[in-house]
Amino acid sequence: MFKGFFSFRRQIAITLDILVVISSFVAAYFIRSFILKFIPFGQPIELGNYWEVVVAITFLWWWIFSLQGAYTLDRFTSLSQEIKTVFKTVFFGTLILLSGAFLLKIYFPARTLIVIFAGINFFFLVLEKTAIYYIVSDLRKRGYHKKPVIIVGTGKKARQFIELIKDDPSEGVEIVGFIGEEEINVGNRIYGADILGDFRNL
């Protein structure tokens, strides 16, 4: 059930990113068209001619996000890290897109559209990740969406780690048990969880 929940959450995260990417491209198209009415810096274009570019961007962004582990279980514990991930994705994605078009001699009539898209997409993705971060943090504080953790050791450092978790429940960690030093202690309960095994079980 836990794996199923994670898979569902992962699919939701990917779907949201795809929708944001597509929406950003459409918004960039209309913004560029609006600016062209006042500043003639390029030729008008048809949005329908860019569906292949949208597909390429979607897959490229997904690939770069995945390389950074954006869809793993332990995400959304640091908002600054999420923003860094978004920045790297948009920056390197745009760089790869424009460089690839240049090196492969692909006709790209509206590079300004891609530049506008990059700015809008960064803004929208940051909004998306910020909203998800606060939603996930709230769920963790309520006892949901926690990562199961087995602590190796039962001494002072283990106690300090537990106190740290209690002081900041937004970390989303659930202690399911301990690995103790001696077999004789297996089954005993300390700090609210059972000793599940000894060091030989590692």
Image (tube, rainbow, N blue to C red):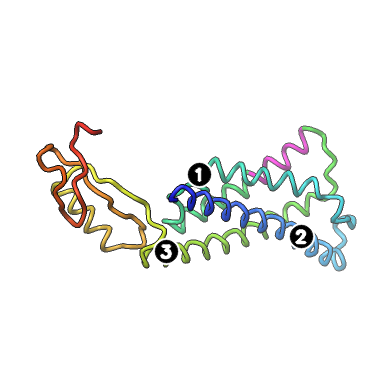
Residue segment shown in magenta: 93-103
Of marks 1 and 3, which one's residue comes earlier in the chain?
A: 1
Q: CA distance from mark 1 to mark 3?
A: 19 Å
Query: Which residue corresponds to mark 1?
Result: 69
Query: Total marks drawn?
Result: 3
For badge 2, the amino acid type reads Val
Q: Which residue is mark 2?
A: 26
The one of 105 and 151 positioned closer to us in this rendering: 151
Amino acid type at mark 1: Gly
Relative image position of residue 113 (x, y in whole percent)? 78, 54
Q: Which residue is located at x 31 percent, y 62 percent?
A: 168
Left or right: residue 147 versus residue 110 is left
Please provide percent x and percent y for residue 2. Answer: 43, 50
102 is within the stretch colored magenta = yes
Badge 2: few (under 14), some or many (20 or more) residues near its Cα, within 10 Å?
Answer: some
In the displayed orientation, state which residue is furthest to the left. Answer: 184
Residue at the spot of label 3:
137
Say which amino acid is labelled 3.
Ser
Q: Splitting the image into 4 quarters, where does residue 165 fall?
A: bottom left
Task: From the top left corner, tell me how far across and down residue 37 is, in percent.
Answer: 87, 67
Q: CA distance from mark 1 to mark 2?
A: 27 Å
Residue 199 rendering spot, x and y as whole percentages: 19, 34
